[in-house]
Amino acid sequence: MACDCRLHLVLRISLLSFCLAGSSEAQDPLPSWNEGATKDALLDFVGCAAKDGCSKYIPPAERVAVFDNDGTLWAEKPIYFQLLFAIDRVRQLAADHPEWQEQQPFKAAIEGDQKTLAASGLEGILKLVMATHAGMTTDEFAATVRSWLKEAKHPRFGRPYSELTYQPMLELLKYLRANGFKTYIVSGGGIDFLRVFAEEIYGIPPEQVVGSSIKTKFEVRDNKPTVVRLPELDFIDDKEGKPVAIDRFIGRRPVAAFGNSDGDLQMLQWTAAGDGPRLCMIIHHTDAKREWAYDRDSHVGQLTRALDEAKHQGWFVVDMKSDWNSVFAFERP
Amino acid sequence: MACDCRLHLVLRISLLSFCLAGSSEAQDPLPSWNEGATKDALLDFVGCAAKDGCSKYIPPAERVAVFDNDGTLWAEKPIYFQLLFAIDRVRQLAADHPEWQEQQPFKAAIEGDQKTLAASGLEGILKLVMATHAGMTTDEFAATVRSWLKEAKHPRFGRPYSELTYQPMLELLKYLRANGFKTYIVSGGGIDFLRVFAEEIYGIPPEQVVGSSIKTKFEVRDNKPTVVRLPELDFIDDKEGKPVAIDRFIGRRPVAAFGNSDGDLQMLQWTAAGDGPRLCMIIHHTDAKREWAYDRDSHVGQLTRALDEAKHQGWFVVDMKSDWNSVFAFERP
């Protein structure tokens, strides 16, 4: 490569910040969070982590923050959105599967029979997932999810699922990244389902999404190398699986973890047990009006052990109703 | 968070590059690569990928380059260094395992009986690996590898294994990163073995290391959450496993891939089959004097199918002897 032999002299004047007395609101990185102990804890932890010389400074490479997805970054009611995708997909594919008219849980999915569907349990759900998430190439699956996200509407809010993300959490993700944190999703949901939209709606690239998976295999189809999805479970990224997956995918212990259910307990424990500054936070669904109120008795996103442990360990518990002045972006004035 | 209310005016003068006629060597990002078609291909691909408007420009998020490790980034003779670690470890642990004096392949490992060791095959190797890589926490395992790397010396060169890295490849990794590429290791070697040193010797952080793995589990030991290594294979990141692991860990198809053996063939195929600019390269060990010369008949790093495919597909084949003016940093003047 020949040298261009030019003298590059670049003069850059950066007006980094210019603020006048009284304009502090304009600078608030977390405008959807009400003033209070929770917001103070976030501002203190993140601000100090990124400030050299601060007592709770964290070297850039160690600034890893992990987030559960369902119920932490977006809603999870009436049931996990990925399951709603599977049900919609069963209906789309039903014409090619006349046998489903008589087979459970497919019959229930086609008829919208929620009760039978719920009664089919984990085994039933897995049948739906395997029938709708396997048998195609990874590219084909991603295309299916992408087109579903464009069309499908949430049953209560009548809006695309991508709008059911929590505005305060989107602000927090941005704030963390602006301070040199790498933000990861560590979800019980399917890794390949999440990766289709995580970058667009959360700003989290595919390589920072960890989730449950089915097995895949490499196959040359019509002279074209492909990766094909198999109808066999590979890994469940929930409960004890979360620290295992964090260790496998990230290879570092996070310094901050955010969850909302007992499925996140071990991830929070694993994060909290590291040396140095740590932030562990649980999103508590307390707002039946703007979202939902549920914890100990909920079938989706049950929160019992992790809520007790939060009290015991001094983890922060976000009270959705009082800590968030807006839940979804669409409800903001 | 109150506003500081100061006027920050930062004046930054960056002298980006300053070069005089005839000083092109000072600018060469790949000084250990001899001038020729291979070096030209690298400079052209990387330079153009990062230059907006260039016909082979690649958006930053897509700049993913994957590297095999053994035989591609560091040497792999007389046998894989991780196996030498396992053998050294068996000797260290032998006092606590009197039964090994009579059990193969442990007896052979203790006595340095390479022939019996080789004859024990994959099954024998797995026994050694399970006995030395499992049963402890992830932190304990990392500490063992770290201390081995500090002490152990390569049998031919009498130097630490970390010095057996290829200088031209270290330059290439840096050059790629300087142009916005994310560099990943995708190795048949153990992911947790590699992560101990990949950041220090290659500048590749743990979250960008993909490799073979054994199973692990989350366990609270003495009130302390740990991840414990189990004596059970989880995933072999070799051959067809490489594209599968790339898809699972990275979730994007690489635009550049570098390997040296048939174990890398499918990774190269998967990379080459994507749309847009691609670079696939095979390191051919042709220098018996400075390193080793081997390909089709070698037990370690056999190169047959991938060499044929390289010719067929027009992938670049690095001739170590003629393309590299130095192999290891320690041999440089």
Image (spheres, coloured by chain):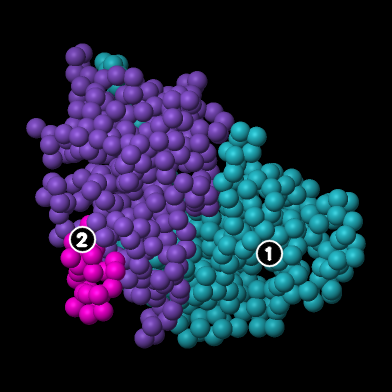
Chain colours: A purple, B cyan
Q: Secondary structure at mark 1?
A: loop
Query: What is the distance, in whole Å, between disc 2 and disc 1 at their CAs?
Result: 61 Å
Q: Is residue A315 magenta?
A: no
Question: Which residue in the rendered view is the most extreme toward the top?
Answer: A21
Q: Position of residue B94 (x, y in %)?
A: 86, 54
Residue A204 visible? The answer is: yes
Going by the image, does B63 lie left or right of A30?
right
User: Dot 2: what SS?
Assistant: loop
Residue at 64% from the left image edge and 55% from the top image edge: B230
Q: Quadrant of residue A132?
A: bottom left
Q: Name the amino acid type tagged 1.
A: Ala
Q: Is residue A46 left or right of residue B157?
A: left
A125 lies left or right of B144: left
What residue is drawn where x is 57% and y is 70%? Answer: B238
Question: Magenta residues, as a range?
Answer: A87-114
* Chain letter, disc 2 residue: A
Q: Which residue is mark 2?
A: A113
Location of the C terminus of chain A (image quadrant) = top left
A300 shown above or below A273: below
Image coordinates of residue B319 in percent, x first then y, are: 60, 74
Q: Which residue is mark 1?
A: B75
**Which amino acid, mark 2?**
Asp
Q: In the image, is residue A107 part of the stretch drawn in magenta?
A: yes
